[in-house]
Amino acid sequence: MPEKKVIAVVGATGAQGGGLVRAIMNDKGGPFTARALTRDVNSAKAKALAALGAELVTANVDDLESMKRAFAGAHGAFCVTFFWDHFSPEKEIAEARSMAQAAKHAGVAHVIWSTLEDTRKWVPLSDNRMPTLQGKYKVPHFDGKGEANAAFTEAGVPTTFLLASFYWENMIYFGSGPKKGPDGKLAITFPMGDQKLAGIAAEDIGKCAYGIFKKGRELIGKTIGIAGEQLTCAQMAAALTRALGREVRYHDVPPEVFRGFGFPGADDVGNMFQFYRDFAKVVNTARSPDVARSLNPALQTFDAWLAENKGRIPLE
């Protein structure tokens, strides 16, 4: 048996990284093994990955030397940042630069950078239809990642740029699920009009990333956009109604109303949905369920995801 090639996975206890580690380790006959990078190797999530056979390594994306050590000897690296830890695009850009430099230093043969669009290419800062945030961004958690693409290109690292979609898990963890209105009826609320929202099960992002590593060199230099399904919010409400056995309506609100909802990052998320709505063709053309399914034949539809997860969605 040839020795398995190591894929170093940043954010291994997070949604995307965890999915990738599980995909690698569950493919017993596959060519790869996972090195799970985490700040806390003693966490329950880290121990669950170790139980699958993954190698655990302590690393911090803020510490270049720790990243160099973590990437040493790896064939591939999955690079991701988590904006909602700190709400700082500048920090994300610095973290991406650190990962790119570490990958270059280690001679990694294939990097996947989990990125998003720099929305300022379509909505310049002078465009007042959408407020400018933090002085120089329209959608900070998109724009920083998009700007950071250059860190990998300029470092000369062989990179595939992965565009993910709206996580359906946001209905569980981020408050995007159905809520009771004053009339006691359940509704999902988005500023999307009748445009389609590209969505995906978080676990499928990791499975698609695994598919990219398996394809190897042919996807280096490419941008690969993935979605489980593209649905209008009315279609999502109908799917929720079927799954829950209770009527769920779609409440369409203007982006400025959504930005005023007051939760941390509401202005950023409101701008994101406005970008999704106003540039639906750009966003949805870039994210293909067919491409995702070619990388991950077990890709879930929204109905399939709901069948598994409906009991986890808080409804009160």
Image (tube, rainbow, N blue to C red):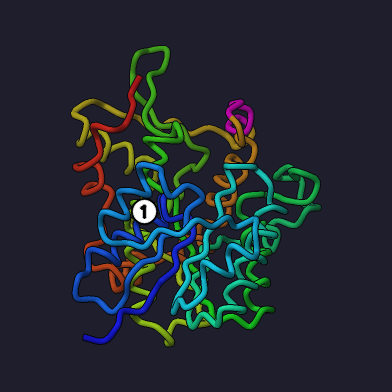
- Is there any visible trace of residue 123 in the rendered image? yes
As drawn, is 58 to the left or to the right of 269? left
Which residue is drawn at the image coordinates 36% and 79% (left, top)?
A: 5
Q: Which residue is mark 1?
A: 200
As drawn, is 92 to the left or to the right of 107? right
Which residue is drawn at the image coordinates 28% and 48% (left, top)?
A: 302
Q: Is residue 75 or residue 41 the one in the foreground? A: 41
As drawn, is 18 to the left or to the right of 79? left
Give the vertical position of 25 relative to 183 (above or below): below
User: Which element carries disc 1, helix, strand or loop?
Assistant: strand
Residue 263, position in %: x, y?
A: 58, 28
Quarter of the image with the N terminus in it:
bottom left
Quarter of the image with the C terminus in it:
top left
Q: Which residues are magenta?
A: 257-263
Which residue is drawn at the image coordinates 58% and 42% (left, top)?
A: 85
Q: Is residue 186 or residue 264 the one in the foreground? A: 264
Magenta-colored stretch includes residue 71: no
